[in-house]
């Protein structure tokens, strides 16, 4: 974004002919840092042979700062104010001189990053084919910000203003999943040479971390024309939140055989049933748990521009939490056992010599889940130490959410069915067209897809 310079002129002073004499009254110069909002999506694929086997990598990188605007979030601005130093302002020709300047700085981060990596390792064989896949997902969010504002001494004006020494917030989130999957293909359970029986095993572990802190430091000054500013009120407050990570564990196992039958007269029937069972244990949305919050509020009792223990007032409030999320809610954990039964079936009709073929496909699925939802009551202990010029008062307060501990068992089930009707037309040797109708029922068309395939 281009830097800016804005000049504001005063037209209140006329010349001998009554024509206003412009003179600069305010000048604002702003330098912008950072780039405009954007979104980056990149993916990289790699495949190579290794000792007769095949190894590959699938890397995806996602960066998003679409909510970022340098004009309001990342800049360095100096505003200079002028006054008319002539003998009789408003009557004689103006003599602009610098009155005072205001320096503002703001830096904000709104970065979201996501990196996903899969590394498959394929081992061919006469009787079996095996693929091992390593999985790594990393995501992070940085929402930090800093603000500074300072005033110079004045030459002509008198006022009271606040210098912002610190107005900083650090808020970050980090999450990663690591796991692995094994897929093995075996010969048919019903004879034949095809490897059409597949089973899979998947396991992942995920952790999330959250960090938050803020500091506010201000100094109120009294400004008098032609003299150095006098410090009036100094204040400094800090908040620091410490958390413990949240964990997710997932295990998944599934199996699926394939069947193919040639019924003659251009009719083939293919079926693929599958069964999958999974175990998932996690807190909702991987919300980190609050461990401790420390707040320090200070008062510059003698207005000397600094905080001294034993002279000024320092109030330190330490709150420790048990079973409390960073959102302030009770700790919850959901453990579910899921079962999925699926079946796909395709009936194809295209006699030899025909340019047109028809395929009727059907998908049926049944999903059931048994979920245990546990909730532990949030409790907290607040210890306030008030050091007022050496006089220390300690107050301890305890509290809870009042919701109590609970455990619930919830069952759910969900059927699903869909049908496809596909028409394929072989226009030329290397050119085909497909038209597919999809819907819950054959008479209820939800989607229409038309696709052309040209083999090069």
Image: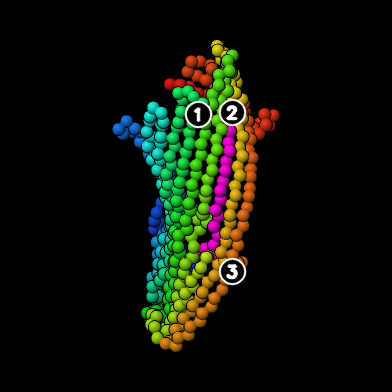
Which residue lies under the disc numbered 2? 345
Residue 179 rendering spot, x and y as whole percentages? 42, 47
Residue 221 rendering spot, x and y as whole percentages? 43, 78
Q: Nearer the viewer, residue 176 or 226?
A: 176
Q: Is residue 98 above or below residue 268?
A: below
Which numbered marker is on residue 401? 3
Residue 226 rendering spot, x and y as whole percentages? 38, 79
If you read the primary sequence from the N terminus, does the residue marked by circle 1 or circle 2 appear first? 1
Q: Quadrant of residue 46?
A: top left
Distance between mark 1 and mark 2 Cα atoms: 18 Å
Q: Residues within 10 Å of mark 2 (few under 14, many from 20)?
A: some
Q: Is residue 255 left or right of residue 363?
A: left
Distance between mark 1 and mark 3 Cα atoms: 57 Å
Q: Nearer the viewer, residue 226 or 282?
A: 282
Q: Which residues are magenta?
A: 325-343
Q: Is residue 341 magenta?
A: yes
Q: Main secondary structure of the magenta part?
A: strand
Tell me if residue 392 can be seen: yes
């Amino acid at each position: 974004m281009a830097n800016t310079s804005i000049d504001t002129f005063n037209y209140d002073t006329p010349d001998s002919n009554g024509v206003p004499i412009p003179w600069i009254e305010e000048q604002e110069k702003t330098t912008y840092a950072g780039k405009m909002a954007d979104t980056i999506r990149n993916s990289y694929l790699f495949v190579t042979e290794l000792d007769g086997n095949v190894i590959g990598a699938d890397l995806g990188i996602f960066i998003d700062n679409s909510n970022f605007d340098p004009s309001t979030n990342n800049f360095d601005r100096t505003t200079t104010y002028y006054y008319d130093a002539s003998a009789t302002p408003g009557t004689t020709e103006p003599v602009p001189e610098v009155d005072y300047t205001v320096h503002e700085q703001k830096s904000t981060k709104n970065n979201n990053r996501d990196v996903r990596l899969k590394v498959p390792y394929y081992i061919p064989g006469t009787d079996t084919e095996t693929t091992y896949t390593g999985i790594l997902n990393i995501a992070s969010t940085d929402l930090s910000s800093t603000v500074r504002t300072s005033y110079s001494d004045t030459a002509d004006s008198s006022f009271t203003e606040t210098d912002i020494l610190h107005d900083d917030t650090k808020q970050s989130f980090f999450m990663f999943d690591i796991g692995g999957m094994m897929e093995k293909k075996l010969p048919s359970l019903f004879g034949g040479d095809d490897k059409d029986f597949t089973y899979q095993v998947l396991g992942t572990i995920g952790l999330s971390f959250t960090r938050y802190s803020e500091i506010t430091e201000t100094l109120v000054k009294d400004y008098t024309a032609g003299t150095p500013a006098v410090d009036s009120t100094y204040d400094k407050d800090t908040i620091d939140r410490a958390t413990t990570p949240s964990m997710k564990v997932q295990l998944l196992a599934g199996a699926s055989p394939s069947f193919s039958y040639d019924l003659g007269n251009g009719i083939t029937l293919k079926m693929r049933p599958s069964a999958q069972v999974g175990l998932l244990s996690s807190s909702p949305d991987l919300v980190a748990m609050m461990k401790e919050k420390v707040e320090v509020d200070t008062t510059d009792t003698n207005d000397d521009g600094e905080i001294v223990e034993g002279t000024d007032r320092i109030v330190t409030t330490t709150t420790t939490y048990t079973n409390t999320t960073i959102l302030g809610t009770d700790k919850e954990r959901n453990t579910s056992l899921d079962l999925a039964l699926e079946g796909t079936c395709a009936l194809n009709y295209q006699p030899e010599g025909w340019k047109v073929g028809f395929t009727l496909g059907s998908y049926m699925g049944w999903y059931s889940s048994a979920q245990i939802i546990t909730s532990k009551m949030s409790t907290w202990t607040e210890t306030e130490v008030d050091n007022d010029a050496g006089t220390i008062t300690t107050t301890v307060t305890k509290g809870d959410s009042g919701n109590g501990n609970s455990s619930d068992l919830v069952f759910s089930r969900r059927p699903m069915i869909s049908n496809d009707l596909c028409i394929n037309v072989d226009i030329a040797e290397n050119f085909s067209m497909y038209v597919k109708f999809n819907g819950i029922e054959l008479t209820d068309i939800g989607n229409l897809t038309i696709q052309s395939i040209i083999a090069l």
